[in-house]
């Protein structure tokens, strides 16, 4: 069942340690089959070098495990919230990569300061609000996902225009058109966060890039009038 998607999600998960985005089991990637309303996610607490495509867990968008011997990632309810809240995405990645997690812990959004940022993120990469005590004590992982949706919606951007968020005191979530793109965005986010921190270290007063330059770069790669790459 969903063998192709399992392989894709397995490959995407294995890319996390290869890209230096996770240590131990600190991360998870999923991918959804929108037609069937099912998604595939990494099993909970299994080391990357022990993973195989068969070990990926198939879960319904209602949270029910459809197939798999192992328990799905403990962050599964966050992934479900994102798939239900953002119908335009089909892959989600979560890591604790160092620079992105540092921004999440500091509660500092990453501002658009250069074209690397603008090629992927249409503006400031936001930080979620603090979860309430109730939200932490009941259905914590689901509430984390709902808070991410709230943050993106409040930003006035779509999930395609802003494919990432910093969960306050936790770490980054990224998404994309499939599991592989979600991981790609996780790697770009890590690099973008690193560049932002370095830029502010060199010059704390450095200002945001001009809006014209942000527009030029973002819309060269995204949307109806994109011109980047090969036709
Ligand atoms: Zn986490």
Image: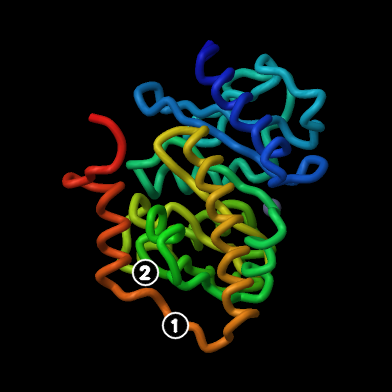
Give the secondary structure at mark 2.
helix
Horizontal side of 171 relative to 229 (left or right) equals right
Find out whether the residues at labels 1 and 2 contact each other: C-beta distance under 8 Å. no
**Observer-nearest of 117 and 82:** 117
Q: Where residue 149 sits: x, y (%)?
A: 43, 58
Distance between mark 1 and mark 2 Cα atoms: 20 Å
230 vs 216: above or below: above
Question: Which residue is painted at 29% across and 73% down in the image?
Answer: 211
Question: Which residue is painted at 75% across and 23% down in the image?
Answer: 51
**Observer-nearest of 84 and 8:** 8
Quadrant in which residue 218 is drawn:
bottom left
Q: Which residue is mark 1?
A: 207
Foreground mark, 1 or 2? 1
154 vs 158: above or below: below
Question: Which residue is painted at 79% across and 45% down in the image?
Answer: 23
Question: Which residue is painted at 26% across and 60% down in the image?
Answer: 216
Q: Where residue 221 sits: x, y (%)?
A: 30, 47
What label sits on residue 155 in the rendered view? 2
């Amino acid at each position: 069942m969903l063998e192709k998607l399992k392989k894709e999600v397995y490959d995407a998960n294995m890319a996390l340690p290869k890209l230096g985005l996770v240590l131990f089991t600190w991360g998870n990637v999923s991918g959804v089959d929108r037609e069937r309303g099912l998604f595939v996610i990494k099993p909970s607490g299994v080391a990357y070098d022990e993973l195989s495509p068969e070990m990926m867990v198939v879960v319904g968008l209602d949270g029910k495990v459809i197939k798999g011997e192992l328990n799905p990632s403990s962050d599964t309810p966050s992934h479900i919230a994102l798939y239900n809240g953002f119908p335009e995405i089909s892959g989600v990645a979560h890591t604790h990569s160092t620079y992105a997690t540092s921004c999440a812990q500091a509660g500092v959004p990453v501002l658009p300061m250069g074209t690397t940022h603008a090629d992927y993120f249409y503006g400031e990469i936001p930080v979620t609000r603090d979860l309430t005590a109730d939200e932490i004590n009941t259905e914590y992982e689901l509430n984390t996902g709902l808070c991410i949706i709230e943050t993106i919606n409040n930003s006035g951007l779509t999930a395609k225009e802003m494919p990432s968020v910093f969960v306050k005191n936790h770490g980054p979530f990224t998404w994309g058109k499939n599991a592989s793109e979600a991981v790609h965005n996780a790697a770009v986010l890590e690099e973008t966060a690193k560049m932002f921190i370095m830029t502010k270290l060199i010059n704390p007063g450095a200002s945001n890039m001009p809006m014209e330059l942000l527009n030029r770069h973002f819309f060269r790669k995204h949307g109806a009038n994109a011109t980047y790459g090969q036709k």
